[in-house]
Structure formats: C-alpha cells, structure tokens
Amino acid sequence: MTGAESTIVSSKVLTVPNLLSMLRLALVPVFLVVLVQGEDAWALLVLAVASLTDFLDGFLARRFGQITRLGQLLDPAADRLYIFAALLGLAWRDLVPWWIVLVIVGRDVFLLGLGVVLANYGFGPLPVHQLGKVATFCLFYALPMIMLGEAFPAVSWWSLPLGWAFGLWGAFLYWWAGIIYAVETARVIRLPRVNPPRPSDTLE
C-alpha cells in the first residue's frame, strides 16, 4: 500500500486526531461536575487538558493529512459544549446571571432553526462567518477568566473585569453573527433552483 493510499484509508477510519476530539468531549461532564462543586482550580486544569488535546488534534490532522468530516464536526461541538458547561456551572453557583445563559443558548437554538430552513431548501450549513469565530473566541476565554478569579482571589482584580469584558462583548458579537446568518439564509433560499432540492454538504 502506498503512502497516498494509506492517507486516504486513514481519513476514513478512527484517526488519532478524532480520538483526541472524543477525549475532549468525554471530559465535558468531568469539567461540569468539578465546576459545580466549586473546584475552580481543578476545572481550570481539566479545561487546560482539553485545550491541549484541541491543539494536538488540529496539528496532527494537518501534519499527517488526517482531516476528516467527523473531526470537522467534533471540534466546534466540543467548543460549544465547554462554553455551555462553563455557563451552566457558573450560573448554578450564581457567579453569572441566568440571562447570559439564555442569551448564548438562545442564539444557538436560533441557528439550529436556520439550519432546518436551509435543509428544507436543499442546502447544508452556511460557511462559518469570521464574526462568529471572534464571538466564540471571546466566550471561550471569558469564562475561564472568571473561573480564574474565583480560584485565585489574588488575581481577581484583573481576571474578573477582563472576563466580563470578553463575555459581554462575545455575547453581543454572538448575536450579531446570528443576524448575519439569518440574512444570508434569507438570501440563499431565494436563489433560483435548476434541479429539485436535495441535501448538500457543500456549504460548511
């Protein structure tokens, strides 16, 4: 078997990058439990391990040509689950208001509805907008900053304000990106169709 053939085969089976992504997903409930219990230092450690697996699976997938559809689905799913888990854990302890949770979760429910509309017209998911990536980045780093301030009060004077700044800005951008997706969805479904609608994954 040639190297090219082995690369093609490996892209169709469970690769090391995909295993790392699954490990990151498996750590989500662990992260949530220790966070709800108030063990912020341990929660940060779990999050650090998850972030390391995130870096490694991306590096290995690019380095060895093992980018798969499964990996492309698992990575953003893991990011969102960690954001949701952090929001739920902190809200449960009254460290963030529940309306923040509703704003973030509501936006993803909104996007899920847009996905259903697109699927009914024969389109796959829209391309990820850069603004959405920035919003996710803000949220992904805002919540650990708040946790850091709770775990180590000596640094709370800068970590908490920074975390809240990232969080509020991220929530705003999250919905801004959602409105952009809604506008783009309205544009796409009005496009003339030559063939009958059929499922497509060309838009990612």
Image (cartoon, helix red, strand yellow):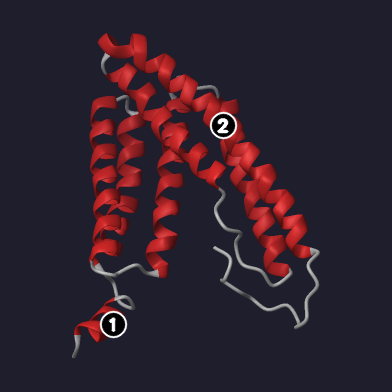
Q: Which mark is residue 80?
A: none
**Depth check: 160 or 126 in front?**
126
Please state the horizontal and vertical placement of residue 203, each as a whole percent of the image: 58, 66
**SS at mark 1?**
helix
Question: In this view of the protein, can residue 94 be seen by the observer?
Answer: no
Please state the horizontal and vertical placement of residue 64, each as a whole percent of the image: 23, 68
Could you tell whether 88 is left or right of 71 in the image?
right
Please state the horizontal and vertical placement of residue 182, each as a whole percent of the image: 71, 50
Q: Which mark is residue 171?
A: 2
Residue 151 quadrant: top left
**Depth check: 153 or 9 in front?**
9
Please state the horizontal and vertical placement of residue 116, each as a whole percent of the image: 68, 61
The correct choice, above or below, for 198 with respect to 32 in the image is below
The residue positioned 31% from the left and 58% from the top of the image is 22
Could you tell whether 9 is left or right of 134 in the image?
left
| Amino acid type for the residue under numbered disc 2 | Ala
**SS at mark 2?**
helix
The residue positioned 64% from the left and 37% from the top of the image is 176
Residue that numbered label 1 is attached to: 9
| Amino acid type for the residue under numbered disc 1 | Val
The residue positioned 18% from the left and 90% from the top of the image is 1
Query: Split into 4 quadrants, where in the image is the C terminus?
Result: bottom right
The correct choice, above or below, for 163 with respect to 176 in the image is above
The residue positioned 26% from the left and 56% from the top of the image is 59
Q: CA distance from mark 1 to mark 2?
A: 41 Å
The correct choice, above or below, for 122 with respect to 171 in the image is below
The correct choice, above or below, for 134 with respect to 183 in the image is above
Residue 37 quadrant: top left
Q: Are marks 1 and 2 in contact (CB under 8 Å)?
A: no
